[in-house]
Amino acid sequence: MMTIDLTKMPKLGFGLMRLPEEKGVIDMDHVCRMVDAYMDAGMNYFDTAYVYHGGRSEVAAREALVKRYPREDFMLATKLPAWEIHRAEDVDRIFEEQLERAGVDYFDFYLLHSIEDGSNYETYEKYDCFNWGMKKKEEGQIKHLGFSFHGSPKLLEQVLDKHPEIEFVQIQLNYADWNNPVVRSGELYQILHKRQIPIIVMEPIKGGTLANIQPELKEMFEAERPGASAASWALRYVGSLPGVMTILSGMSTIDQINDNIATFTDFEPLSDEEKKVVDKVRAIMLNIPLIGCTSCRYCCDGCPMKISIPDVFSAVNTVKLYNEQFRPQMFYNGLVQSSGRASACVGCGQCEGVCPQHLPIIKLLKEASEMFDN
């Protein structure tokens, strides 16, 4: 296995999954300003995927990055989606489409997207995608091969044993999910760290959840480190872990870019006292049962009723966190002007089939409907 030099990787990676939009169209002027601010800070790792923004994220990378910077100045990662592979020739077709969309002739990092227990992993094995990826490496069209992972610790060990050629693994990791019985971030991290496999982190702020915590929890952070955002605490928690190569943040605004750059400029790992504060915050936070949605939006494209499921769940969580109904209800009322109500769910289950968090979405939408539609 080729060793990746962790010292040459930026600690903060730019995730192109939650780009700013205006009326359903990516705001490219805004994205270009964000890319420039990130690059000006000396950081250069960009992560996209075939399915992000309905297939428009790779194109946005081309327009905001590839066309505007020398190819050697940045690293670009994208992913092969198992659920789009229905025959052997689809693998090459998708890859060629990705090269064209992004406007490049190689990807620095290429991932098999969302390996998990069941169909995705079976698809990658069925179509020999690991060997396919190694051939693309030999041809120079992929520099580093890895996978993103949403499965069990047992499956992770199984995949790593079978595929020692894998150079890095991307996992969901944050302080709230460390002991989450579904996500099991801590166990996955320990497996990879023990094997000395470089780790790329996704969802370090849990889809923005850890940036918008309860006021009393923010006050606990503020008392220990005045002026530091809740998001910076979440990022520093992950950045303090040995073996973490790059931490992806799906940034949507210039303010988020600037805050994250400040966190990783002259990066300070958490002190022992700060770790105790995080432990206290987590203990209080986890006493409130929230919907563990990270707003990946995989559930949205195939929903026959066009329900904006992550936004519905965000409204539910806001009610639970702040014990306040008015603003979440107003948000929901505005949401359903252009998308389906929670009550419109027909129980087809496609959303549950693609949810990386394995949420019981049908049941949760029924509960959301009882909260907002009545």
Image: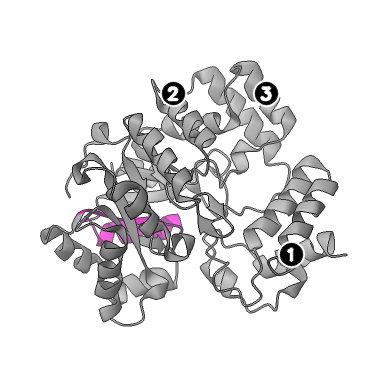
Q: Amino acid at mark 1?
A: Gln
Residue 75 appears in the rendering: yes
Q: Position of residue 311 (x, y in %)?
A: 66, 56
Q: Which quarter of the figure has residue 160?
A: bottom left
Dot 1 falls on a residue whose secondary structure is loop
Image position, residue 234 (x, y; %): 53, 34
Considering only order in the chain, which callout, 2 or 1, is on the residue closer to the N terminus? 2
x%, y% of residue 211? 60, 37
Image mark for residue 359:
none
Label 2 and label 3: CA atoms lie apart by 18 Å
- Distance, label 1 to label 2, CA atoms, is 45 Å
Give above or below for 126 relative to 211: below
Q: Which residue is mark 1?
A: 337
Residue type at mark 3: give it: Met
- Residue that appears at 73% across and 44% down: 288
Residue name at image x 75 percent, y 42 percent = 321
Discs 1/3, front: 1
The tag on residue 269 is 2
Image position of 65 with respect to 157: above or below: above
Determine which quarter of the picture holds residue 34: top left
Earlier residue among tags 2 and 3: 3
Camera-side mark, 1 or 2: 1
| Start-end of magenta stretch | 143-165
* Residue that lies at the very extreme toward the right in this rendered image: 374
Q: Is residue 3 magenta?
A: no
